[in-house]
Image: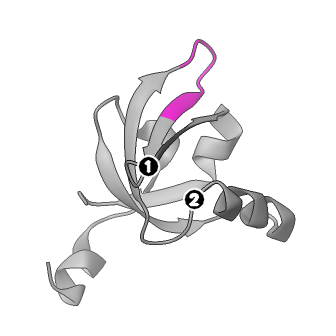
Amino acid sequence: MTASNEAAIPERSLDGCPVGTVSVLRRVEATRLRRRRLAELGFVPGARLEVIGRGGVGGLIVAVDADSRVALDAAGARELRVGGPA
């Protein structure tokens, strides 16, 4: 995929993605401290994310670069902006 094609893919928040969705993290919309914590968990721009499950109150289970599984609450999932397939 070329840079111009990537730019054409619309961004959306991770919380709106159904189970099975594979996407690329484009940006994190959070406070500096929260961005740092998310980066420690592997949520950095360019990371490949796969939604592998949903919790009862809107949380997600996410595979990050196929290396780890992370549980996010709904607010955390809304802070992650993703686009297109990986």
Between 51 and 84, the residue placed more toward the observer is 51
x then y, percent, for residue 33: 85, 65
Between 13 and 21, the residue placed more toward the observer is 21
Amino acid type of disc 2? Gly
x then y, percent, for residue 56: 59, 12
In the rendered image, the vertical position of residue 15 relative to residue 39, given as above or below: above
Instruction: Give me the residue at 32% from left, 54% from top.
Output: 23
Residue tagged by mark 2?
A: 42
Between 72 and 40, the residue placed more toward the observer is 40
The residue stretch that appears in magenta: 55-61
Label 1 near label 2: C-beta < 8 Å? yes
Residue tagged by mark 1?
A: 67
Which SS class for mark 1? loop
x then y, percent, for residue 41: 64, 54
In the rendered image, the vertical position of residue 32 relative to residue 78, given as above or below: below
Amino acid type of disc 1? Asp
Picture quarter containing residue 59?
A: top right
Which of the image's four quarters has the C terminus? bottom left
Which of the image's four quarters has the N terminus? bottom left
